[in-house]
Every structure is written in structure tokens, then in C-alpha cells.
């Protein structure tokens, strides 16, 4: 055709790279644009997107650092002679993590080269539906034309612009993982997966950490539990392990002190007072905004959701412009997860160039929040199941269990909990599984296959557990919420 | 006493022989000049591609453990050759395009370049004997 490339992918993250490499397998001429606009604090990074650079990867590694700290404390009970208290050096961890991330940046670059995908480090914007132009860092203009274009630019953390000093003095997750020096005493408003995970590992490595929350999660009210039941358990655990929670508070201003510390002032909605404290770091967790501002979508007619700003796509990832597609965090109504972006990207490439018609299945996507006590889940939450089928038509099996490893270590198991939401009718199909405990991601992964295959409660009960594990408790779930019986189970 | 005299005589030997080059490896002008960090593409063109002497190019990265062992080992041996071979160091994060152009995929990757052409190459860590043979081949060939 008259266009230079068969496929142009804008955004070199999880979705974009997967789509580009898959398309190249079909012998197509493919190009990828990737560009990282530095954060307000000046942080930037290489190829690979959010997951590799400022998301999943560094987060999980730092979570691991914190878990190792706990393990060192447990070790004494198991006979190890370790002098307490044990100290953590941020810069050693940060360098290790940052070096690994850089090796991934390089790995992605090499992969593009090996798969013959052309790479441009430019910030592109549409000048017409088949043309994207951009400037390199050196200011040189490059024009790329393509038959098909996939937008996969992802998102960036938002700042609470109404809070004075938020932009000048605060950081976000974009900056946290690249800090060379310890963030010190940290405040993170508000409660999102990212702030809980970050506050979790910051506490775990010994830093004074506070999470600010606008509303209190519902506690222990079993009759109308939602995913919030799991959220409460997770935050309760964090609180008992040293993370401070400022409940029903919201910040009004951030000022810098002569000592370089940050003075944060907030309103306490319960007491109707104004409070203040100083921190070394304020990390905002107020959500992510889709990275569409500089794409120039309006001129070419790609429709976005007026509220979220995300690109509206149909089941085939097509936007309102026929040959322009979008995948990953940038798309409306899709999970903000790496595996779904990758899968969607690959399937899209297969549909475009490989004569496939398979669409991405966004149902029953398993996921895990890597807080100190992890929460993994797949399928419907209890609330969603009630909403969809009615509370009379679902059965919730649950249990408070005790990880064996925690016993000798004398660890608190109060929040180690799991529940399985099933249909009540004949087959008793499993709608959702929720697990709080160590290695939640590893536990849930296998069960995701079961749910995908339409597993039922009777089938689960016929599945023999592996002993001694935490996962085996899933195969033994038998106490229903409906019965009102005490859900505490013992191992042997 | 005899030992001390012998040592004194050794130390006053002229700059030739095994001791001499060993001293030279520790930051003397010859050692410093024979190894350099590539600044950019045109620097690579000038000092490597257009170099009258053969050049050993060490592609390395901050995050690469084996690179930190190979680099100094190679530098030491290059310095011993008293300017017969030069060594160019390229940090692949700073000069990604250059590394990709020369088909580097894993690090460390070491190229032997003569008159602008790649005449030899190895990937990964090598011991001193292997490196000496590599360098010898480059000067000899």
C-alpha cells in the first residue's frame, strides 16, 4: 500500500510490544513508537512500559525485600541466630531493582531488533488517520505512516491538583521506584492497590509510613460483605504490622519546610478538625489518567470516554476509526493489567494478519494485590455475584485458616481468610474465589484454570488437597456464610 | 641483606621486561591512553572505526555482573600491550543504538576491530589466557 508500515504501534509497554512482535511473526512491516515524558519530578525510564519500569516488576521486587525482612524476624523462632533489630539499606535494594529493570529495557530493545520491528524513541501524535509524526529527544521530526495503528500508550499517575503544593512537592509511583535515597517517613493518600502495596513494603523495610483514607472500609459486617471485606482484612493486617492509617481525612495543602521536610495539613472529617504533620515524602495515589493528551485524537475522530478520558473500543479492540485500535490501560472498561494487555495485543495481531477471529476474553481474569499479606482473586466478587444472581441464588463458602509456616514463627493469622462464591442451583458452578494469605498469586493461578473450565463446587470437593499447604484449604471449604457458623478451620 | 640489595637493583631496572609493563598497568600514561569510554556515535567513528591501530570494543552495562569482572581483566591485558591495541568501552544503556547497530544482544560482548571491520568477537566472560590469545590474534592477524 501507500503507507510505509503494515502496523504502527504507539506505546512500547506490555500491550504494545506484544502486539508488535506478534504482527512481525507474520512477516509484516511493523514499527513501534515509545517515549517516556519525564514525571513532574523528572523521573524517566526506558523501553517496556509501566509494568517493567514503574509497576509490577519493581513493586514485586520491593515487596519481596519487605517479605525477606519479615522472614528474618521469623527466622529466630526457627533457630537462626540473627541479631535484632535488622536494618535495611534503601540504596542497595534500589540499585538492585533498578539494574534489573534496566536489563529488561535492554532485553526488549534486543527482542524488537531480532523480530525486525522498527523502533522509534519519539513522542508521536496523529496528523491524519494514517500518519503519526513526532520529535526525537534531539528535536528531529520523524513521520510514520501505516495501514493499521494500535494505540497502547497506557496511563500515568494523577496529581490532586486542588491540593496546594501537591505537584511541586509530592511524588507518585513513577518516582518511588527510581529514588536513589530512602523516601524516609512517607505519607500516601489515598487507598488504592498501589498505595497499599507501596505502603506495605515501605513499612516492611522499616520506614514510618502512613496511608490516608477518605472513608473507613467496612469491618466485619459479614451480611453485606463486598470486595471490601477483603480490603478491610488486608488493611487490618497492615495496621497490625505497623502501617498507620489516617481515616476519614483528606489533605488540604503541602508545604516545604527549611529542613526540606514536607508539612502536610489535612482535614479530619470525623473530628471536624485540621491536623498537620511533617514527612520526608508524600506519594500520591489518586488514580491513573490515560496518556492521550498529546496524541491529537480529536482531530482524527477517535472517541474517548468523557469522564475517564480513556479510548472507547469494541470487543475487537477497534476504536471509532476503523483501522485504528487500542489496547491496554488506555482502553475504557478493561482491567489495568499486563497479562490482559499482552493477550489482547497478540490476539489483535492474529486477527489483523493471521486470519484469526478469536476475540479477547476479559472474563474471569485472575489478579493479586501484593500487600504484605497478599490478596489474590479470580472471578466475581461476592457483591457482583449478589447483584447478578441475587443473594438467594448464591452460596458463599469461607474459612479463616492458619498458614503452617506462621505457627512456629508466632505470626498473627487473624486475616488469613478465603471465600468461594458459588451458584446455589444444581451444578453449583464456582463464580469467584478470593484468598488472603502468603503467595496468594501462586495459589490463585491454578484455580483460574478451573474457573475458566466451569468448575463446580462438587468438583472442588472431589479435588484432593496438597498437604501441608494453604491452597489445600480451598479444596476443603465447607462452612457457608449463610449458616452463620464460626469459619475458623484447623489444619490437621 | 642480600635480598634487600637484590630488590633495590630490581627496582632500579630500566623500563623494560615483565616488571616494567606490570608497573605500567597501574594508571601510567600509556595505560590510561589505551582505554577510553566512547562518548557518542561520532566519537566511535573517529576513535574506533577510523583508528589506525586495532581496537577492542567492550560493550558493557551497569547492571551486568560479569561485565564488572571482564572489563578490568581486559583493560589490564590491553595496557600490557603498550599501545599496540586500544580499548573502547561502550555502555549499552548510554549508546543503545550503537550497540544494536553492532548486533550486540547479550553483555559483555567484545568486538575486535581492525580498519573499521569486525574481525573477531566473543560474548560472555573469558579468563586471562583466552583474552591474551584473543588479543594476540588481533595484533598478529
Image: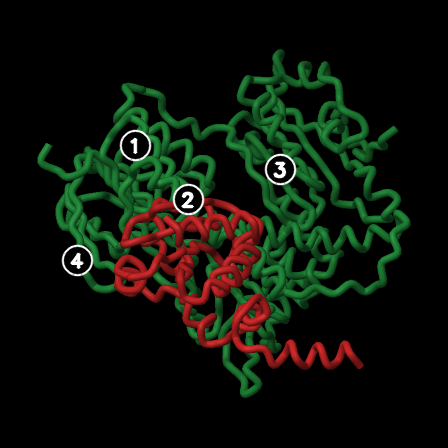
Residue A241 lies left or right of residue A256; in this view the side is: right
Tell me the residue that label 1 is attached to: A24
Q: Can you tell which mark lies on residue B105? A: 2
**Separation of marks 1 and 3 at Cα, in angstroms:** 32 Å
Q: Is residue A351 above or below residue A199?
A: above
Measured Cα–Cα span from mark 2 to mark 4: 28 Å
Q: Which residue is mark 4?
A: A141
Tell me the crowding category of disc 1: few under 14, some 14 to 19, or many 20 or more residues within 10 angstroms, Cα based. many
Mark 3, Cα crowd under 10 Å, few <14 / some 14-19 / many 20+, is many
Q: Tag 1 or tag 4, which sits nearer the N-term?
A: 1
| Helix, strand or loop at mark 3 | helix
Please provide percent x and percent y for residue B88. Answer: 39, 61
Q: Which chain is green?
A: A
For residue A49, say whether it is visible.
Answer: no
Q: Residues within 10 Å of mark 2 (few under 14, many from 20)?
A: some
Look at 57% across and 34% down and name the residue there.
A381
Q: Label 4 is found on which chain of the structure?
A: A
User: Which residue: 33% across, 61% down?
Assistant: B53
Front of the two marks 3 and 2: 2
Judged from the image, the secondary structure of the residue bearing numbered disc 4 is strand
Question: Please, which chain is the residue tagged with disc 3 on?
Answer: A
Which colour represents chain B? red
Who's the residue at 14% across and 50% down the image? A127
Is residue A351 in view? yes
Q: Which residue is mark 3?
A: A441
Q: CA distance from mark 3 to mark 2?
A: 32 Å
Can you name the residue that lies furthest to the front here? Answer: B2
Q: Residue at x 60, y 35 (%)?
A: A377
Pointer 4 local density, CA inside 10 Å: few below 14, some 14–19, many at least 20: few
Residue sitting nearer the eye, B14 or A207: B14
Chain of the residue on which disc 1 is drawn: A
Q: Nearer the viewer, mark 1 or mark 3?
A: 1
Amino acid at each position: 500500500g501507500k503507507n510505509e508500515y503494515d502496523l504502527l504501534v504507539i506505546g512500547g509497554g506490555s500491550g504494545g510490544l506484544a502486539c508488535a512482535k506478534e504482527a512481525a511473526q507474520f512477516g509484516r512491516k511493523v514499527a513501534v513508537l515509545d517515549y517516556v515524558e519525564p514525571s513532574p519530578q523528572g523521573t524517566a525510564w526506558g523501553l517496556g512500559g509501566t509494568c517493567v519500569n514503574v509497576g509490577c516488576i519493581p513493586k514485586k521486587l520491593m515487596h519481596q525485600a519487605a517479605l525477606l525482612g519479615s522472614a528474618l524476624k521469623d527466622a529466630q523462632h526457627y533457630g537462626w541466630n540473627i541479631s535484632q533489630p535488622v536494618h535495611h539499606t534503601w540504596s542497595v535494594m534500589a540499585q538492585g531493582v533498578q539494574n534489573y529493570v534496566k536489563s529488561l529495557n535492554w532485553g526488549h530493545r534486543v527482542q524488537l531488533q531480532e523480530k525486525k520491528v522498527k523502533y522509534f524513541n519519539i513522542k508521536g501524535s496523529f496528523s491524519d488517520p494514517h500518519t503519526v509524526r513526532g520529535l526525537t529527544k534531539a528535536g528531529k521530526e520523524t513521520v510514520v505512516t501505516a495501514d493499521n495503528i494500535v494505540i497502547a500508550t497506557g496511563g500515568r499517575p494523577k496529581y490532586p491538583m486542588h491540593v496546594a503544593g501537591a505537584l511541586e512537592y509530592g511524588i507518585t509511583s513513577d518516582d518511588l521506584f527510581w529514588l536513589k535515597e530512602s523516601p524516609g517517613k512517607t505519607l500516601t493518600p489515598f487507598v488504592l492497590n498501589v498505595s497499599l502495596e507501596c505502603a506495605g513494603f515501605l513499612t516492611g523495610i522499616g520506614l514510618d509510613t502512613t496511608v490516608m483514607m477518605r472513608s473507613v472500609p467496612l469491618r466485619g459486617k459479614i451480611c453485606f460483605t463486598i470486595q471490601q471485606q477483603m480490603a478491610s482484612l488486608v488493611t487490618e493486617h497492615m495496621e497490625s504490622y505497623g502501617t498507620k492509617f489516617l481515616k476519614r481525612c483528606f489533605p488540604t495543602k503541602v508545604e516545604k519546610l527549611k529542613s526540606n521536610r514536607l508539612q502536610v495539613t489535612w482535614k479530619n472529617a470525623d473530628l471536624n478538625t485540621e491536623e498537620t504533620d511533617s514527612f520526608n515524602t508524600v506519594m500520591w495515589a489518586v488514580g491513573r489518567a490515560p496518556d492521550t493528551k498529546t496524541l491529537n485524537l480529536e482531530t482524527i475522530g477517535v472517541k474517548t470516554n468523557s469522564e475517564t478520558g480513556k479510548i472507547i473500543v469494541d470487543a475487537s479492540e477497534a476504536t471509532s476509526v476503523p483501522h485504528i485500535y487500542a489496547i491496554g490501560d488506555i482502553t475504557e472498561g478493561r482491567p489495568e493489567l499486563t497479562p490482559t494487555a499482552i493477550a489482547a495485543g497478540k490476539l489483535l495481531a492474529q486477527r489483523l494478519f493471521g486470519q484469526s477471529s478469536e476475540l479477547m476474553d476479559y472474563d474471569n481474569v485472575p489478579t493479586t494485590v501484593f500487600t504484605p499479606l497478599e490478596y489474590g482473586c479470580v472471578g466475581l466478587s461476592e457483591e457482583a455475584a449478589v447483584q447478578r444472581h441475587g443473594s438467594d441464588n448464591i452460596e458463599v463458602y469461607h474459612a479463616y485458616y492458619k498458614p503452617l509456616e506462621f505457627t512456629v514463627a508466632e505470626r498473627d493469622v487473624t486475616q488469613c481468610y478465603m471465600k468461594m462464591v458459588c451458584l446455589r442451583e444444581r451444578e453449583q458452578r464456582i463464580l469467584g474465589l478470593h484468598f488472603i494469605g502468603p503467595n496468594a498469586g501462586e495459589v490463585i493461578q491454578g484455580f483460574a484454570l478451573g474457573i475458566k473450565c466451569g468448575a463446580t463446587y462438587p468438583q472442588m470437593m472431589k479435588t484432593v488437597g496438597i498437604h501441608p499447604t494453604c491452597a489445600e484449604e480451598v479444596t476443603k471449604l465447607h462452612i457457608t456464610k449463610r449458616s452463620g457458623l464460626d469459619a475458623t478451620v484447623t489444619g490437621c | 641483606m642480600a635480598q634487600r640489595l637484590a630488590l633495590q637493583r630490581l627496582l632500579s631496572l630500566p623500563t623494560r621486561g615483565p616488571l616494567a609493563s606490570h608497573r605500567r598497568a597501574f594508571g601510567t600514561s600509556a595505560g590510561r591512553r589505551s582505554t577510553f569510554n566512547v562518548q557518542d556515535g561520532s566519537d566511535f567513528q573517529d576513535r574506533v572505526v577510523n583508528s589506525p591501530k586495532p581496537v577492542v570494543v567492550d560493550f558493557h552495562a551497569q547492571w551486568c555482573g560479569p561485565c564488572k569482572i571482564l572489563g578490568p581483566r581486559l583493560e589490564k591485558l590491553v595496557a600490557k600491550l603498550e599501545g599496540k591495541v586500544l580499548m573502547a568501552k561502550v555502555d549499552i544503556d548510554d549508546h543503545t543504538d550503537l550497540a544494536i547497530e553492532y548486533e550486540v544482544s547479550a553483555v559483555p560482548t567484545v568486538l575486535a576491530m581492525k580498519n573499521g571491520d569486525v574481525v573477531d568477537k566473543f560474548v560472555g566472560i573469558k579468563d586471562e589466557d583466552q583474552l591474551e590469545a584473543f588479543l594476540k590474534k588481533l595484533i598478529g592477524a
